[in-house]
Amino acid sequence: MMSNTKQKILDVSLDLFSRKGFSAVSIRDICAQVMIKESSVYYHFKNKQAIFDELLYHFEQVATDMMVRLEQSLSVQSCSMEKPFYQTVCDTFFESYFMDDFCNKIMRLLLIEQFGNSEVQKIYDRWMFAEPLEFQSKVFGTLMEIGIIPKSDSGYLAVKYYAPIYFFAQRWLFSGELSEEQKNSFRNAAYQHIEKFFAEMEVNNV
């Protein structure tokens, strides 16, 4: 079980990293916020990089778990219930990922750090683009199989569906600290896009 001090170091570090970037934050800055001596940080972590690495490790666990839950929801039975299924997908992806406090801060941190760190860039690309697009492509493939949407290129549909959502997320969710107003702006724009997207595809009720 993780000690309270170690968890507080991680929480404070992530908050600072997500606002200022990894390089701009020192161990001293972290200590000042946690109100501990530097020796206490080094008791739990070898250095600042070790804090960063543990945060990323935990994020990848959370993100992987989310994708597993989404994959489990992707069945013919759930897909045939068009609105409930999409509500589940959106609630999981939007509320438990993009707008989750921990994941949102990690995404903002990755967004800052990707330009100077090729490994971070790969992580950012995987969890912001590759994984969501691959899953979305599977969703459209399944919806085509059971006749809810017309046959088409599922990969192209995934990009067409996801691009505006990414745009809205960048505008309202990853441009600074989250507020309820920003979350609601994102929800309104994203769900309006989704409704129009499916309306234009002549969705059939099964």
Image (spheres, helix red, strand yellow):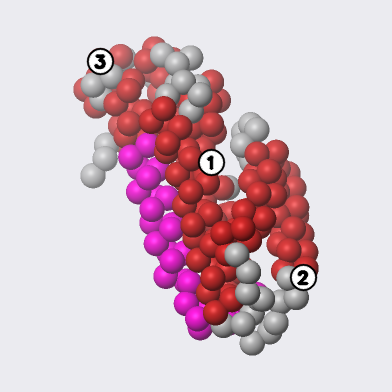
User: Of tags 1 and 3, which is closer to the observer?
Assistant: 1
Three-letter amino acid code of the residue under disc 3: Ser
Q: Residue drawn at (53%, 26%), measured in percent from left and top?
A: 112
Residue type marked 2: Ala
Span colored in magenta: 56-84
Sequence-first tag of 1 and 3:
3
Q: Residue at x 42, y 36 (%)?
A: 122
Question: Counting other residues with Cα less than 10 Å from the Cα at mark 1, is it few (<14), some (14-19), or many (20 or more)?
Answer: many
Q: Dot 1 lies on which element? A: helix
Label located before the other in sequence (3 or 2):
3
Q: For mark 2, give the secondary structure.
A: helix
Q: Nearer the viewer, residue 93 or 136?
A: 136
Examine the rendered structure and indicate whether residue 13 appears above or below residue 182: above
The residue shown at (51%, 83%) is: 77
The one of 18 and 133 positioned closer to us in this rendering: 133
Give the x, y percent position of residue 15. 49, 29
Q: Position of residue 108 (x, y in %)?
A: 54, 33
Question: Are the residues at dot 1 and dot 2 in contact (C-beta closer than 8 Å)?
Answer: no
Q: Report helix, strand or loop for mark 3.
A: helix
Q: Residue at x 68, y 43 (%)?
A: 167
Image quadrant for the C terminus?
A: bottom right
Q: Quick check: is 72 in the magenta stretch?
A: yes
Describe residue 134's horizontal placement relative to residue 196 as left or right.
left
Type of secondary structure dominating the magenta stretch? helix
Tell me the number on the disc at residue 39: 3
Amino acid beneath label 1: Asn
Residue designated by label 2: 199
From the image, tell me which residue sits under label 1. 104
Q: Please indicate whether residue 44 sits to the left or right of residue 118 in the image.
A: left
